[in-house]
Structures are given as structure tokens and as C-alpha cells.
Amino acid sequence: MQRRVLIVVFPGFQLLDMAGPADVFSTADLLLREGGYRVEPVTVRPGAVPAGNGVTVMAAGLGDVVGPIDTLLVAGGLSVPAQIREGELVTAVARLAGAARRVASVCNGAFILAEAGLLDHRRATTHWLTADELKSRYEHVDVDADPLYIEDGNVWTSAGVLSGVDLALALVARDHGHALARDVARGLVVYLHRPGGQSQFSTPMRAMTPRSEPLRELQAYIDANPAADLSVPALAARAGMSERHFSRVFTEQTGLSPGRYVERSRADTARRLLEVTGHPLETVARESGLGSAETLYRVFRRHWRISPGDHRRRFQSKEK
């Protein structure tokens, strides 16, 4: 029997918030012989629903939904504030959530869940640009702006736009195992299923682009040479600055201290090595510049709340 997935849309919704998860579920359905998924876009008033980019989607009415619901997923979009003010969508989502096995949101669709009271006393995430607003507006929601997605009980929330794909892959993995999630990811030619604890930002995305060309080149050097001597004295010498001046300027122009940037860059390298190689942990630690398996473990727990071994078991590509 197929699992019924309702994706809630509304005028001005973000198309990728719907299309990304929908393609994950439909691809999983193609790969499964039974127990797959049936995706149904739903909205307040049935009919054509224009996305924010002008593409129109046909959706059934929320009021017409009958029968069991496996997953109720709410898309985001620039028009979410208007939907909250009008209230009709929020009321319908609150009603159907009680009949769903699990509830989820993509991007600022979390605001609709919060307005419906579904995130009260739960940990949740949303797009990093709107996280502070979610936190200030809903005091009973424990907002964490960093992870790609968060599971708290039967409620899942995800970060901006394409993290909805990561969320959907996680749901598929929960239902049918990580092997299927990896197969779906390869079929869609997307990044391998990433753990929810992974940050919304890779190291370059976390940091601002330096105004100074020498610092931009140094930033690229750090990312390309994780096992090199990336101590402050070595980096300062490479930049032709005193250590004190270099640390001040690098932090000012990137938003991260040299030490934090180097650790995060090395952690990103280690994560990729775990996913695409079968190297022992000691080798991964050495090639990523982290030095030892003990340091690798501490860094993974700090950044992604998962051990290196668990990360590899869950997210390693079969194409090594």
C-alpha cells in the first residue's frame, strides 16, 4: 500500500519546496515494488495554484481530504506571512496534522506549523534568513538555525529550499532504509543524503568572501590544502602580514577567526572523504588535516552531532 504524502501549497509558494520532495518520493516509488508513495498537492481552495515563479500547480482542496495521511508536508514561500494573516490555511493544517502520521515543513513553511501550534516546545529549524524572526515570534519554539533538518517526535522541519530534498531523503531512509535513499539521490543526481545535523552552510558558505584578493586566494588555498600547515603563523606569512594583523583582518573580512575557518574546512574535507572513500579513520584524519581519529571524532560530534563511523555507515556512496 502506498504512503500518502500531502504537500500543502498556496499562491506564491516556493516551487522547489514542493517539487524537490515530490521528486524524491516519486523516485522512491519507482524503485520500490510495494509500499511506495503517492504525492498529492493540496491547498485551501482546489484548482490552479501559482507558485512564486509563475509556474502553476493543480491542487486538491484541503477541506476535501479524507482517509489516512502518512506525511503532511508544508511548503514555504514569500507569501507565508499573508497566509498566516488570513488564517484559513493555518486552521486546515492544524486540523489535518492530527490525522497524519508525521508532519513536516520546508523553509519558512515552519511558520505555518508554528502558527498552528505544532512546534510548541519542540526543536525546529527554518531558512537561516528567517530563523531570528521565528525565534522572536514564537517563544515556545526552540529554534536552531544551523541544521539542514530537525526531527522532534513526529514533526520534521528543514532549512531553506533545497534542504527539502535532504528532508525527503531522510524520510525515505526512515521508511525504507538508507540504501534506498542513496539510490534515490543518485537517480536524481543530487548530493548524497546528508545527515540533518549537518549545517546549512559549507565552510565557504559560512564565511564572507574577503574584500582583499590575497585573502580570497588564501581562503581557496586553505580549502584546497587541508593537510598543509595552516597555523596562524604559517597563514600570516603566506599572506605577508604580521600574525596579529592577519588574525584581525581575516576575522573582519570573513566573519570567522582563522582557527575556526581552518577547522570547519578540514571537517568538510573529512566528511567528503568518509562519504566517497573507504579509507580508515586515521587516514581520513590525516588527509583532512585533523591529525588523529580522536580529533576527527570530537570535530564530528561538535559540528554534526554524529560520529565519523555512523556518518560513513549512513551516507557513504557505493560508487567508490
Image (cartoon, rainbow, N blue to C red):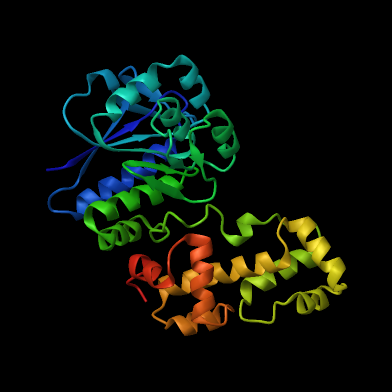
Which residue is found at the position 38% from the left and 58% from the top? 193
The N terminus sits in image quarter: top left
Res 210 visible: no
Along the horizontal axis of the image, is 207 left or right of 271? right
Question: In the image, what residue occupies the spot 57% across and 77% down?
Answer: 290
The answer to whether 33 is drawn above or below residue 284 in the figure is above
Q: Position of residue 88 (x, y in %)?
A: 39, 16
Q: Is residue 42 left or right of residue 274?
A: left
Image mark count: 0
* 86 in relation to 168, above or below: above
Residue 314 versus residue 26: which sits nearer the camera?
314
> Considering the image in quadrants, where does the C terminus appear?
bottom left
Q: Position of residue 291 (x, y in %)?
A: 57, 82
Residue positioned 25% across, 59% down in the render: 177
Residue drawn at x 46%, y 47% is: 162
Look at the picture and state if 241 lies above or below 125. Answer: below
Relative image position of residue 52 (x, y in whole percent): 49, 29
Find residue 45 and report its horizontal and vertical position in percent: 33, 17
Q: Do we see residue 259 in this rendering? A: yes
